[in-house]
């Protein structure tokens, strides 16, 4: 057995509990179960001298120890220790060969176990797991307890033998009964995860507790986990924190990390971001990858330390190199948005793609977006769809049991949230046919399912489905409920939709005050569409006192928001209808701003500024601005008069579907404004606008049919057109319809109806008559509101004068002629004269 060793008395008072590190055995005091990870005889002696549980008669025995000369030769101490140098000192091949030759000849169970270990890990000898199993079995049969334990591990993991978890469990149980601490821990694992036995969390907790009492640090940590998550014991976060702290004080790295999580989230202790950062840093310095990642996270968001995005990037990169999937994802985020490094969409794409290889649903979601929008790669909507689908379906079995909030992760990065996001995106793909066929029913089903699981984006989309009948029957009440639920979770788009519901009575009673409050809440997000709607509330006094100055401020703020991105923002997107698209809303607000400058609403009149705004936004595709630009050119408002440019602007807006521009284009053709006269084209333009229910176009159509302008004369169609136009309540249309009844144009003569229509037209908006200019920017004199009211009043006077549809009343006729003559009606002046 080589050089003879003296028996060391101190060793008889300790049990070897772990001999994985053969130079520094882990030992435990027989009397108080105190553990020492390294069997240092001096420390063992010092402990023995002060241990309160050592019997006095034992302490009186002489203790002599010299670790280099003394060894016990029993199953717990390696008889060959003399040959084994510290692992921190490199051994020569010759020394290693000597060791293997020696233990090959030894019959000591410890040496047989050692040889098995060498074969298992290929230390100084070729790796051979079958031989490993045989040697562990041989040593175990000789009563070597650690070999018996390792035999269990072979069965559990299939090392040199077919995997047999039941057999592994039986061995752990047998060895644990003999006081083997690590086997107690392994038994706990078996019961916790159902390895070789039925899952029994209560028993798992008991075995962890038993091993922890004997100083097994990982078991102390596991007890913390049990208390935190309620595994086999009632949840108690205070106790969880205490056990993590105890294990951390004993150098358990994961426990140091867990302490950081406790301090960060206030789990079982007071929140302390500074302490959280310190714990992560301590664990990170020991190589704990999650902690390295968390240090990056702390630097990014300023948790317990000043924000430093460059350092955040550095730590994410370090953790990513070690294979930390979430850090690879965060690297992608850094490259995508320029966090702590230069913006680089190609590298962002590559990082997301790398993380996807590990099945990370977050990265699948982001990679899908890269393919959808062509960020860092070519656009490929089919691939985007497949990635959203894969991310959405990943771990869906666990989705219903996955908490929305957890101790370990913020909601925004929680697995549940990421799966829901991908499901929501999948719904968007089905709804708009992105990378797949349009399937609104499937989209609706996805929104419904994910809305029930708490995804507020899906709640919002579900509301739109109910409101517009997308993939389901139209149900405005359900739409309102969905918007309300999403708004309660602070979805700004849903506040906007709630405002619309209250304003127009969609699924609820009309309530302008609630509409105003909803728009105000939505505008806090800084979205231009919400600011625009809030501006309209102030402009028209809806649910709040009229305040044109505030309206102007809101339109200006909405208009100027994100204008740097305006030129790159598509008019249409996959995710939003044009009306709610960011670009559209900014353009709408700019257009409104132009109107305010043009008419001096909440500010001084500035027609030049208005013209510039209309011109700029018209070039960006805003057809409202194209229309106003046409009027500016036609009447010389803010620019030189140019009827040709006016015609072109009206035509461009008309081609984009603006009914008012179709009407003005018709007038241009009819009267030869900026174009050659073409009554046929005029009629066609009026007809197109009328099909889009433009009331003034019905009036012009009536004139065309009545007088044969660009079409055959047809008084019946003229009457029908005037009747349709009169439904709008405009006095000019009522006046024309009254004349049809008075003279029997396209209908039977009915002077009573004619009188009623003249009276209605004459009385409409009379409160505003004194403030209405004879000629306005918007209309020719003949069609001006004031003119039409005067014409109707004059006709009403004639009815009273001649007894048309009413009794003759010359006094009333005189009063009407006198009143309208004062307002400039030439016909009335003639009657008076």
Image (tube, rainbow, N blue to C red):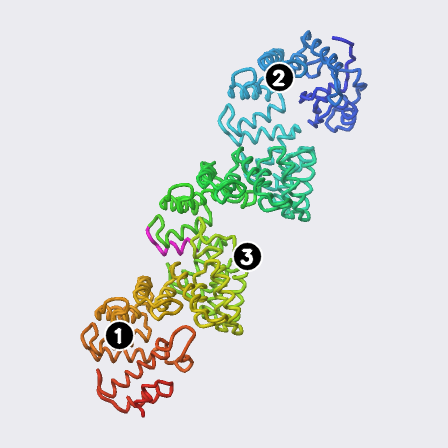
Residue at mark 2: 120
Q: Earlier in the sequence, mark 1 or mark 3?
A: 3
Q: Earlier in the sequence, mark 2 or mark 1?
A: 2
Who is closer to the viewer here, 494 or 318?
Answer: 318
Q: Is residue 264 magenta?
A: no
Residue drawn where x is 48% and y is 52% of the image: 570
- State the mark number for residue 737: 1
Q: CA distance from mark 3 to mark 2?
A: 63 Å
Q: Earlier in the sequence, mark 3 or mark 2?
A: 2
**What are the residue bounds of the magenta stretch?**
473-483
Residue at mark 3: 562
Snapshot quadrant of residue 53: top right
In which quadrant of the rendered image does the N terminus lie?
top right
- State the mark number for residue 403: none
Q: Relative to 411, is 693 on the left or the right?
A: left
Residue drawn where x is 77% and y is 28% of the image: 50
Q: Are marks 3 and 2 in contact (CB under 8 Å)?
A: no
């Amino acid at each position: 057995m080589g050089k003879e060793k003296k028996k060391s008395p101190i060793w008889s008072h300790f049990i070897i509990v772990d001999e994985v590190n053969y130079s520094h055995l882990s030992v435990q005091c027989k009397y108080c179960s105190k553990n020492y990870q390294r069997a240092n005889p001096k420390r063992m002696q010092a402990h023995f001298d002060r241990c309160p549980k050592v019997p006095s008669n034992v302490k009186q025995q002489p203790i002599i120890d010299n670790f280099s000369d003394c060894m016990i030769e029993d199953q717990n101490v390696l008889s060959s220790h003399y040959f084994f140098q510290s692992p921190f000192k490199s051994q020569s091949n010759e020394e290693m060969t000597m060791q293997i030759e020696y233990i090959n000849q030894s019959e000591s169970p410890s040496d047989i176990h050692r040889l098995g270990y060498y074969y298992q890990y290929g230390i100084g000898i070729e790796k051979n797991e079958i031989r490993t199993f045989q040697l562990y079995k041989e040593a175990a049969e000789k009563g070597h307890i650690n070999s018996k334990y390792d035999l269990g591990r072979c069965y559990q993991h299939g090392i040199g033998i077919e995997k047999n978890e039941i057999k592994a469990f039986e061995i752990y149980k047998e060895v644990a009964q003999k006081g083997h601490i690590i086997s107690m821990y392994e038994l706990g694992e078996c019961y916790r995860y159902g390895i070789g036995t039925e899952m029994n969390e209560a028993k798992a907790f008991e075995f962890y507790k038993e091993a922890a009492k004997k100083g097994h640090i990982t078991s102390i940590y596991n007890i913390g986990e049990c208390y935190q998550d309620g595994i086999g014991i009632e949840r108690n976060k205070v106790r969880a924190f205490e056990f993590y702290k105890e294990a951390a004080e004993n150098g358990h790295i994961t426990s140091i990390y867990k302490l950081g999580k406790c301090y960060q989230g206030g789990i079982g202790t007071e929140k302390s971001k500074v302490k959280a950062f310190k714990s992560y840093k301590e664990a990170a310095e020991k190589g704990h990858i999650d902690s390295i990642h968390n240090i990056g996270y702390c630097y990014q968001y300023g948790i317990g330390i000043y924000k430093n995005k460059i350092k955040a990037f550095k730590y994410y990169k370090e953790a990513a190199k070690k294979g930390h999937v979430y850090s690879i994802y965060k690297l992608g985020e850094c490259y995508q948005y320029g966090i702590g490094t230069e913006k680089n969409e190609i590298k962002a794409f590559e990082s997301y793609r790398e993380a996807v290889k590990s099945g990370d649903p977050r990265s699948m979601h982001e990679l899908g977006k890269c393919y959808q929008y062509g960020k860092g790669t070519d656009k490929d909507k089919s691939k985007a769809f497949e990635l959203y689908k894969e991310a959405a379906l990943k771990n869906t079995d666990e989705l219903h049991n996955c908490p929305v909030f957890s101790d370990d992760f913020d909601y925004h990065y929680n697995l549940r949230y990421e799966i829901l996001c991908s499901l929501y995106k999948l719904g968007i793909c089905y709804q708009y046919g992105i990378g797949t066929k349009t399937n609104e029913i499937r989209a609706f089903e996805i929104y419904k399912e994910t809305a029930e699981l708490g995804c507020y984006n899906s709640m919002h989309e579900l509301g739109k489905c109910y409101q517009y009948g997308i993939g389901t029957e139209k149900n405005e009440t359900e739409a309102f409920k969905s918007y309300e639920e999403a708004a309660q979770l602070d979805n700004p788009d849903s506040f906007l939709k709630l405002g619309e519901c209250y304003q127009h009575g969609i699924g609820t009673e009309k309530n302008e005050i609630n509409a105003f409050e909803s728009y105000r809440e939505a505008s806090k997000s800084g979205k231009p569409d919400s600011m625009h709607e809030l501006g309209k509330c102030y402009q028209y006094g809806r649910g709040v006192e009229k305040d044109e100055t505030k309206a102007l401020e809101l339109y200006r703020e909405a208009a100027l928001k994100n204008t740097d991105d305006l030129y790159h923002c598509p008019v249409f997107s996959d995710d939003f209808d044009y009306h709610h698209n960011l670009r559209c809303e900014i353009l709408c607000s700019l257009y409104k701003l132009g109107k305010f400058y043009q008419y001096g609403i909440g500010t001084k009149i500035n027609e030049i500024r208005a013209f510039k705004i209309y011109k700029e936004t018209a070039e960006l595709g805003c057809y409202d601005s194209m229309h106003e630009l046409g009027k500016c050119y036609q009447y010389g408002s803010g620019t030189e008069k140019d009827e040709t440019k006016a015609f072109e602007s009206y035509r461009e807006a008309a081609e984009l579907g603006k009914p008012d521009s179709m009407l003005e284009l018709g007038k241009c053709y009819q009267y030869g404004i900026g174009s050659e006269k073409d009554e046929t084209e005029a009629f066609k333009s009026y007809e197109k606008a009328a099909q889009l229910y433009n009331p003034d176009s019905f009036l012009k159509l009536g004139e065309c049919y009545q007088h044969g302008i660009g079409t055959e004369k047809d008084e019946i169609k003229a009457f029908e057109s005037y009747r349709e136009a009169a439904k709008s309540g405009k006095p000019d249309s009522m006046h024309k319809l009254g004349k049809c009844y008075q003279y029997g144009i396209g209908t039977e003569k009915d002077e009573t109806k004619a009188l009623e229509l003249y009276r209605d037209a004459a009385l409409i908006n009379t409160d505003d008559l004194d403030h209405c200019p004879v000629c306005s920017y918007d209309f020719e004199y003949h069609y001006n509101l004031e003119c039409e009211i005067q014409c109707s009043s004059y006709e009403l006077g004639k009815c009273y004068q001649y007894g048309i549809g009413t009794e003759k009343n010359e006094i009333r006729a005189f009063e009407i002629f006198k009143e309208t003559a004062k307002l400039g009606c030439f016909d009335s002046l003639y009657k008076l004269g």
